[in-house]
Image (cartoon, grey):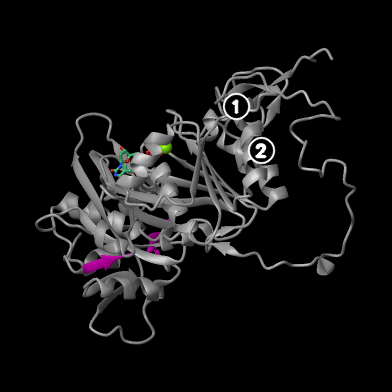
């Protein structure tokens, strides 16, 4: 049979939109230089490798009433790490596909190998690597002190061969390390290309659904910071999580970006040690590792990640500007920083127009909520006026454009977390004031920015 030519089109790496012609800007999301050539697989309906073996391609669909749909109680498979399980929403769900992204060296392979060593005690597992030799894997397992018995491994990059292994051995959990080196032979583009990544991921997804096996796809981050086409994969997988490694830190954070079976924004914290990944059950303690003594510009706040509070330090440095004033912030939204500086000027008269402002979240945590607003601004004023924030004081609260302090969710739990770590004072929005006395904790509740600054003796 003559091989029909693959259809070529272009897919935006950011939003996944298809285009028939290459263009500099994506017509759908407006991003520049994100279109990548994509070779659509030629699918021969009768013998297509994409659908063969799964047996559902021609099954007719039925219409049912939603309340008539039978609910099977899906069992969860635990990884042996409570931090990992929590981010997954309570462990792996049968037949689900999880994409684990992260920089090379973040510890993806290590974490998954350790998890498999635990899972194999009750389930059948398979670790497929296309990146390392079996010997390297064995050396790593020994170094991690893992029992290798019953831990099935294979080096393979051909998706169909992996499917064969899965049907022969019927494992419950399969790791594919990594999706970038895997290929479908029916597709003549190179491994790692958008077409290969998309089609092999789709192939493994169908495999997981039809066989009820958990498949974890490992994905590397490209230099630009994106997993080759993360948006292209996001819709087909059940769960997308990122293992992040802040620069020069031994801590790793695991975050769910999409999860069909649990909450997103849960944060798991690990440390990379010489014996592999160790979970950090009490992350507040490590993110608070303070220097000798506190200095102006340092403020402690309580963030809320998923289902739990976490104490972190925000540092600011305000310095006289020599040219265009700089506003730089790491781990925080720089638009909010500009907004707060405007509110500060307008409502308290403190103007930083001729000053550079730098802000950083210690430990490399990225913050997406608004509760640290007040701590950020207070740390900036503290640096600007060279005055210390009391060491035993936590600060949280959202700042509105009119300079008012707005309450944040879970105020009570945040206060309790601070108290647990020995904080004696808290500066919070009035609307977050605890109804009952917070034993042994002095609460400064302020209505607006002006009051908050006065309470600390700034301004
Ligand atoms: P790895 O799991 O190979 O990362 P990934 O799969 O995400 O690319 O981890 C590699 C890094 O971790 C490497 O720099 C060495 C370090 N490491 C340790 O510090 N301790 C250990 O026990 C192991 C196995 C690795
Ligand atoms: Mg690896």
- Quadrant in which the C terminus is drawn: bottom left
Q: Is residue 348 above or below residue 430?
A: above
Residues packed near mark 1 inside 10 Å, few (<14), some (14 to 19) or many (20 plus): many
Q: Position of residue 137 (x, y in %)?
A: 40, 39
Residue 41, placed above or below residue 163 = above
Residue 254 versus residue 65 in the image, above or below: above
Residue displayed at 28% across by 35% down:
326
Q: Quadrant of residue 294?
A: bottom left
Looking at the rendered structure, which numbered label has been put on residue 164?
Answer: 2
Residue 452 visible in rendering: yes
Mark 1 highlights which residue?
A: 194
Q: Nearer the viewer, residue 92 or 323?
A: 92
**Ligand 1 quadrant in view:** top left
Residue 272: percent from left, percent from top: 30, 48
Of tags 1 and 2, the one toward the viewer is: 2
Assess disc 2: are there few (<14), some (14-19) or many (≥20) residues with their C-alpha within 10 Å of its C-alpha: few
Residue positioned most to the front: 149
């Amino acid at each position: 049979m003559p091989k029909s030519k693959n259809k070529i089109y272009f897919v935006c790496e950011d939003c996944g939109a298809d285009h028939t012609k290459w263009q500099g800007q994506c017509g759908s999301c407006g991003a520049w230089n994100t279109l990548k050539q994509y070779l659509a697989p030629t699918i021969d309906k009768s013998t297509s490798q994409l659908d063969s073996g799964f047996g559902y391609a021609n099954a007719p669909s039925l219409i049912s009433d939603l309340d008539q749909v039978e609910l099977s109680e899906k069992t969860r498979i635990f990884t042996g790490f409570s931090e990992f399980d929590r981010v997954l929403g309570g462990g792996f769900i049968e037949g689900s596909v999880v994409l684990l992204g992260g920089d090379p060296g973040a510890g993806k392979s290590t974490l998954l190998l350790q998890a498999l060593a635990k899972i194999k005690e009750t389930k059948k597992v398979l670790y497929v690597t296309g990146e390392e030799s079996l010997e390297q894997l064995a050396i790593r397992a020994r170094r991690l002190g893992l029992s290798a018995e019953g831990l099935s491994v294979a080096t393979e990059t051909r998706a169909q061969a992996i499917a064969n292994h899965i049907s022969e051995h019927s494992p419950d959990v399969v790791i594919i390390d990594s999706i970038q080196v895997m290929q479908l032979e029916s597709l003549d583009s190179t491994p790692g290309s958008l077409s290969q990544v998309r089609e092999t991921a789709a192939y493994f997804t169908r495999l997981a659904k039809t066989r009820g096996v958990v498949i974890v796809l490992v994905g590397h981050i490209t230099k630009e910071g994106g997993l080759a086409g993360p948006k292209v994969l996001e819709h087909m997988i059940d769960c997308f999580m990122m293992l992040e490694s802040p620069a020069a830190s031994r801590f790793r954070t695991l975050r769910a970006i999409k999860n069909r079976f649990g909450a997103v924004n849960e944060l798991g914290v690990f440390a990379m040690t010489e014996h592999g990944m160790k979970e950090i059950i009490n992350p507040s303690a490590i993110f608070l590792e303070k220097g000798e003594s506190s200095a102006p510009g340092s403020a402690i706040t309580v963030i809320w990640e998923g289902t739990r509070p976490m104490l972190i330090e925000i540092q600011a440095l305000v310095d006289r500007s020599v040219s265009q004033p700089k506003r730089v912030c790491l781990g925080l939204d720089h638009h909010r920083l500009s907004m707060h500086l405007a509110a500060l000027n307008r409502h308290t008269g403190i103007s930083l127009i001729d000053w550079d402002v730098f802000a950083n979240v210690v430990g490399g945590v990225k913050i997406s909520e608004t509760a640290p607003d007040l701590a950020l601004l207070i740390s900036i004023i503290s640096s600007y006026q060279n005055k210390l924030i009391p060491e035993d004081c936590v600060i949280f609260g959202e700042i509105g454009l009119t300079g008012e302090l707005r309450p944040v969710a879970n105020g009570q739990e945040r206060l309790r977390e601070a108290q647990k770590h020995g904080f004696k004072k808290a500066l919070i929005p009035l609307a977050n004031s605890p109804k009952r006395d917070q034993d042994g904790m002095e609460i400064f509740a302020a209505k607006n920015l002006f009051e908050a600054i006065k309470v600390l003796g700034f301004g």
